[in-house]
Image: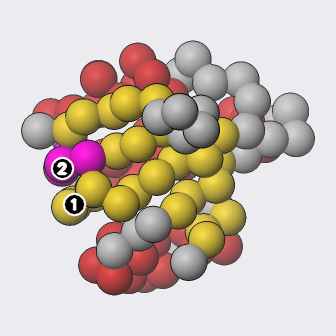
Amino acid sequence: MLTIEMNENGHIVLAGRFDASQVAKAKGVFEQLNTSVTVDFRDLEYISSAGLGVLLFTQKKLRETGGGLKLINMNGHIKDVFRYAGFNTIFEIVE
């Protein structure tokens, strides 16, 4: 199960598992974005290729207007997934 919340800093906080069963829920949030935003991965345990696809779509859309996603607090496993997929060159990932 995936939870998506906005914290007091205006960051999107992801928690749980971001897989194909959660894509519709995530799209509902990410498709509404029209400006740069920080996404906090602190409590995210897992992300599948379907989850990566939602983030990639959002990043491409935001880049068209000069914005983008900033990804923070990734655990080692998720950071490896982004690196293996080459997404570390597409997203701003803060250690």
Q: Give the quadrant of residue 4.
A: top left
Identify residue type, mark 2: Arg
Q: Nearer the viewer, residue 64 or 74?
A: 74
Q: Magenta region: which residues? A: 15-20
In the picture shown, does residue 63 fall above or below 34?
Answer: below
Q: Residue at x 45, y 22 (%)?
A: 29
19 drawn magenta: yes
Say few, some or many: other residues with alpha carbon within 10 Å of mark 2 (under 14 / 14 to 19 / 20 or more).
some
- Mark 1 lies on a secondary structure that is strand
Label 2: element kind: strand
Q: Main secondary structure of the magenta part?
A: strand
Q: Percent position (x, y) of residue 78?
A: 34, 71
Instruction: Give the residue type at disc 1.
Output: Tyr
- Furthest residue in direction front, as rendered: 8
Which numbered dot is residue 46?
Answer: 1
Q: Which residue is mark 2?
A: 17
Quadrant of the rendered structure where residue 1 is? top left
Q: Are marks 1 and 2 in contact (CB under 8 Å)?
A: yes
Locate residue 84, reporting x and y percent: 42, 81
Q: CA distance from mark 1 to mark 2?
A: 5 Å
Horizontal and vertical percent position of residue 95: 56, 78
Q: Tell me where residue 38 appears, x and y as whole percent.
A: 60, 47
- Name the disc covering residue 77, or none: none
